Structure formats: C-alpha cells, structure tokens
Amino acid sequence: MYDGIIFDKDGVLLDSGINNFRWIDQVRSEAAEKRGYEFTADDSYTLIHATSVEEIDQLITSKNMSWGDLKIIEKEVQKKKKKLIKDGTITLFPGVKKLLNSIEVEKAVVSNAPKDITEFTLNHFSIEKHFSKVNATSVDKPKRYYRRKKPKPVMLKEVIDELGFENPLMIGDTSADILAAENAGIDSIHVNSYNFDPKTDPTYQVPRVEKVEEIIRNS
C-alpha cells in the first residue's frame, strides 16, 4: 500500500501541451529576438531535456547569451503561461479534481516547472489544499534550478524525507519523471498524456490521468 502520492504538474494535472508545446518555443524565440539572439525550436528542446548545468552553459555560450539572458527568457515563458491559464486556454485535465478527492493518502507535487508558476497554477485552480508539500525550484537562480531538476532525484527525496513517506508513488508523464522516481528508488506511473515514451520502464502505465485511481485503489 502506497503511503504517499507524488504528482508531477504539467502533463499530469495541467494540460499545458497545446499546439504540441510549440507555444513555448515561440515565446522563447520572441523573447530571445528582443534581446538580439536567435533561439530555435531545437534550442528549446535542448533546454528542456538538458540534465546538467554544463549542457545549458554550452547552449547559451553558443548563442553568445548569458545566464541572466536565459533567466529573462524563462520568465517570459512563465508570464505567457499565466496568461493562457487565466484566459482558459490551459486547463486542468478532466477528472483531476475527482482524482485528488478520491486519494486518501498524503499527496505532494514535485515539478520541473518553476516555483512561481507551479504555485500560481495550484492556487488558480483551487487544488493547493490537496497537497502537503509542493517542491519546485525558482528560476531566479538558473544554475541552481538546473542542478535540481528531474531526472535528478533531489526534489523527490526532499519530499519523501519531509513527509516521512516509506513507500510513495510518483506520477509523471515524461522520462524525467520516471527516471527521477527510479533514481529515488520508488515506484512510478507513466501517464501517457502526450504520447511520450519514457526512456525507462515505469512500474505502471496509463493512457490518461483519471486511470490512476484504479491503480492506487488496487495497490
């Protein structure tokens, strides 16, 4: 029996994948262009999937950008995301509130989305009350952000230690989520919201988030 459930946010709770996430590429490109830099969709992909500070440093150096420039660009992404949430373009997945109400064990959120937008999202949709702990890292110090982001297990382990979980379950939609769970030594559910195949094997796999309830109920 799992004694805690740890949720990723985007792709599990929040359906932010509109236009196959190309809206994010566009915001980054436009924000970079305003500062005199070129930032392509491939660059955006590298940024999202990088697992070390060194990879990011190599990317921004190749663009003649600074870490400060990167912080400003990422702040623009979060600003746009807030607008899309406020105007109803980005919403929770169907069944999320029902799922959260159905889970009786303690719950937490561990997200690679920056701290500000993560807290905004939970508050905007009035689901913050369901979570004993929300762990996300600010982009105000971007090097620290990239040192902590999943698939590194650091944020998961902090939640596990703080809440005293002995047998928690991680729910995520990306390889980073599933690898973070594996690196933390816990079970995982891959929610295939956007048809992303994880690079490692999750404990369970479901096509959409509302199917998670059955797994938890039968565990």
Image (spheres, rainbow, N blue to C red):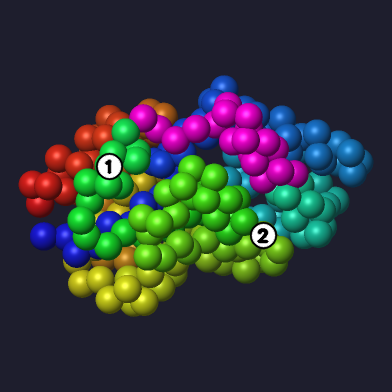
Circle count:
2
Q: Report whether residue 181 is seen.
A: no
The three-letter code of the residue at mark 2 reads Val
Residue 174: give x, y in percent of width and height. 41, 43
Q: Quadrant of residue 215?
A: top left
Residue 142: give x, y in percent of width and height. 68, 62
Report the residue that reaches farthest toward the left.
Answer: 218
Q: Nearer the viewer, residue 106 or 200?
A: 106
Residue 185: give x, y in percent of width and height. 26, 65
For the residue carrying disc 1, how many other residues have a C-alpha within 10 Å: few (<14), some (14-19), or many (20+)?
Answer: some
Q: What residue is rendered at 40% in x and 57% in y? A: 129
Q: Look at the picture and state if 78 lies above or below 153.
A: above
From which residue to which does the magenta span run?
76-94
Q: Is residue 71 magenta?
A: no
Q: Which residue is mark 2?
A: 139
Q: What residue is rendered at 10% in x and 51% in y? A: 219
The three-letter code of the residue at mark 1 reads Leu
For the residue carrying disc 2, how many other residues have a C-alpha within 10 Å: few (<14), some (14-19), or many (20+)?
Answer: some
Q: What residue is rendered at 81% in x and 46% in y? A: 63
Whichever of labels 1 and 2 marks the residue nearer the N terminus, that label is 1
Q: Quadrant of residue 38?
A: top right
The answer to whether 64 appears left or right of 198 in the picture is right
Q: Which residue is mark 1?
A: 99
The answer to whether 103 appears left or right of 69 in the picture is left
The answer to whether 133 appears left or right of 46 in the picture is left
Label 1–label 2 contact, CB within 8 A: no
Q: Is residue 89 magenta?
A: yes
Secondary element at image label 2: loop
Residue 91: give x, y in percent of width and height. 50, 32
Number of the front mark, 1 or 2? 1
Q: Nearer the viewer, residue 129 or 193?
A: 129
